Image (cartoon, rainbow, N blue to C red):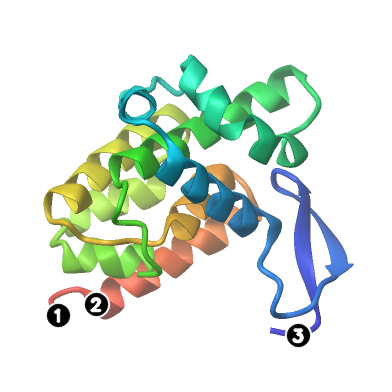
Amino acid sequence: MNDAETVPTEMGSPSSTARPAHTPPPRHRAVAALRHALEAANPGTLAALRRADPASPPAAFYRVTVGVLDEHLPEGGMRRDADERRWAVVISAMASAHGLLKPVPFGEALAKAGVAEMRVVRLLEGHDDQLADLVRNVVHQLVQRAQPFDANDLADLVVTDGTERGRESRRRIARSFYRHEGT
C-alpha cells in the first residue's frame, strides 16, 4: 500500500486523501470501536442485537452505535436510513459471533467452516435485503462451527454493497474462499 489511499468520506463516496499506511481505514476503526462496545454490552443488549430486524433496528442498536457511527453516516434522510440498515446487519452478525471476531479473512473462515460453495456464491451475488438474510445464515454456520472471522471483511461486504468498493470486497472474499476451500 502506498502513502495515499482512497478513503470513503461518506459510506461509499470515495475521495483521494493522504493517510499513513499504518492507519486503519475509518470503517475499520468503526468496527473496532463497535467490537469494543459489544464486549462491554450486557446479555440483553447482545440478545436484542442478535435478533434485530435491519429494517427496524432496536433501541440496543442505537445504544451501541450512536457514538461510533455518527461520524460515518450522512446527517439524515433516506441515505442515512439505508446506511443504518446495512450497519444493523453488521452489528447483528457481530453480536451473534461475539467472541469469534478475530483477524481471519472472511472467505478463509467460510472455507474452513465448510460453507457450501453455492451458499458463498449466493452471498457474493446478493444485495440489500437478500444480502442481509444470507449474512445471517452464513454467520450462523460460522458460529455453529466456532469459526472465527474478520468483522472488517464482513462490514466491507455489507456496507459497501452496490459500489465499486463493494465489488472489490466481494472479489477479495471469493479469492480467499477458493484459496482455502478444501483445506
Q: Is residue 24 left or right of residue 10?
A: left
Q: Which mark is residue 180?
A: 2
| Residue 141 x, y percent position in the rendering | 17, 48
Q: Amino acid at mark 1?
A: Thr
Position of residue 137 measured from the top left corner of the image (x, y, whole percent): 24, 39
Q: Residue at x 70, y 43 (%)?
A: 11
Q: Which mark is residue 2?
A: 3
Neighbour class for label 2 at 10 Å: few (<14), some, many (≥20)? some
Foreground residue among 166 and 9: 9
> Which residue is at 30% across, 53% downward?
99
User: Is the residue under label 2 in contact with that under label 1 (CB below 8 Å)?
Assistant: yes
The amino acid sitting under disc 3 is Asn
Can see residue 14?
yes
Q: CA distance from mark 1 to mark 2?
A: 6 Å
Pick the residue in front: 86 or 177: 86
State the residue position of label 1: 183
The kind of residue tagged 2 is His
- Verify CB contact (< 8 Å) between mark 2 and mark 3: no
Q: Quadrant of the C terminus?
A: bottom left
Which residue appears at 38% of the width and 52% of the height?
Answer: 124
Q: Earlier in the sequence, mark 2 or mark 3?
A: 3
128 left or right, relative to 13: left
